Amino acid sequence: MTEINPWALGVFIVFFAATIVIGSSIQLIRPLFRGHSKGSDAQEEWGLGGRGFGPWVTWFLVGGDFYTAYTVIAVPALVYAVGAYGFFALPYTIIVYPFIFLVMPKLWKIARDGGHSTAADIVRARFDSRTLEVIVALTGLVAVMPYIALQLIGIRTVVQSLGLPGDLPLVIAFLSLAAYTWMGGLHAPALTAFIKDIMIYIAVLVAVTVIPMHTGGYAALFSNVAPHEAVLKAGQGLPYATLALSSALAAFLYPHTLTGILASRSADTIRQNAVYLPVYTIVLGLIAMLGYMAHAAGIVTTNNSLVVPMLFHKVFPAWFAGFCLAAIAVGALVPAAVMAIGAANLVTSNLLPTQTNPVMASRITAFAVKVGALLCVLFLNAKFAIDLQLLGGVIILQTFPALILGLTRLRLSTASMLAGWVVGSVVGLGLCWMDGLKPVHPVNLGLVSGNVSTGLLSLGVNIAVVLAISLLWPGRVSAPAGQAVSGEAA
């Protein structure tokens, strides 16, 4: 067990606890928010922040959904273990921002005009199908659990690196997330996202400046990386590209990322953020480099998730290592809270009957979702922490036809959406089970041969089924986006 350093532990507790206290007491300082809406009901305030977040708050909130334990723990761990292949997260974020710019303002307008707060609300209005609404809601609920599990692993990892024994780090991770989300609602992560991002920026900028100085500079850093790890190996190009594409398509289907979009003040706010959010990609590339820096610093471990905490402990003085670890923990806490809130919105809006106390129902639901995420940590045996996020991507991609294709003028039937979801989910989860939660599956289609993203494969099957059934058996079809459902096809 790692020996406890009181300086590192003390600094970590101060910053991590301060974030939880600020987020949990947000009800007292909520009027400071420029976007606070006095006319919105309590549930909309708790779950969507009153739909009043302006460009700055939205920038930190939506950007914060990308700077999670996925970014600071899982990506460097993958780079440490497999080399350049782990950098697929960079093109993924580059692809996703044009998608936000083109699609999300339209989705926001439909949600605003219809009073919708979730993806399932939008799908129900588009297809007039309670069954499809429930399926989309359940899919989002299930998909977000392994993603929250990844955040719990991130918090547990940094607490574990501070020397706390046994299951105590996981208990701390779970209870801190539960307390943080319970009181503040969406305003809590919206405010503390500022704190989180500043802490992350400080930690990363210092790390990418100081660590190379300790290891002989960037030239020495790359010389310590084996040649086969510095570039993609033969056969890695296809999985690299398809993982990037599937991750980009899935990114804003999740309940938490869509919650950040729907909480925005206007469509222009979303477009502005799509323009400026690529700044995060630059920092993401620097964070991924920590995997290489760990090799240069002589870090040796069989637990890849500990790579970044071990690197910080080795290079930095104890007090600054504690600060950096607090930044990572807060970086997992903030998006995990948005994820739980997004999932709670789905349950209270689309799965449960009307409640007399919707805020309490949302709080209880968010807690139950975190319990589900805890079970994912305990029982899903993923080789890499990042595989949990990619598993969530396979699941949530099955809502792409109903939510995104549903925005187009294609006359797609409700029956085709249901059939596509069933077939795509069976194929995607079946392949994941066969491959031991690996996010890619080998295919051989003549010209295309190699490992392909399981999420992209299952989405392709889903869309093929949707188009085939819509052509062969139109049945009840959706109307063009923003119009009423047409009833039966002619």
Image (cartoon, helix red, strand yellow):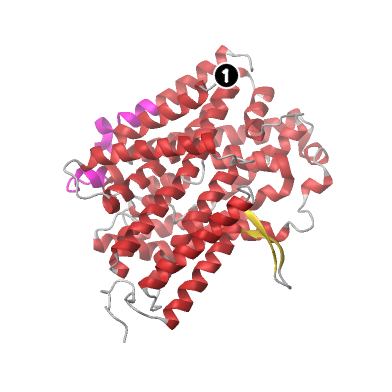
The residue where tag 1 is placed is 319
* Picture quadrant where residue 241 is located: bottom right
Q: Nearer the viewer, residue 189 or 361?
A: 361
Residue sitting at x 38%, y 31%? 178
Majority secondary structure in the magenta region: helix
Inspect this view and state whether residue 262 appears: yes
Q: Position of residue 369 (x, y in %)?
A: 39, 40
Q: Position of residue 155 (x, y in %)?
A: 51, 30
Residue sitting at x 57%, y 29%? 157
Q: Which residues are magenta?
A: 20-45
Q: Nearer the viewer, residue 155 or 434?
A: 434
Q: Secondary structure at mark 1?
A: helix
Q: Nearer the viewer, residue 453 or 205?
A: 453
Q: Position of residue 236 (x, y in %)?
A: 73, 56
Q: Is residue 9 above or below residue 29?
A: above
Indicate whether residue 33 is drawn in magenta: yes
- Residue located farthest toward the bottom when viewing the structure as drawn: 490
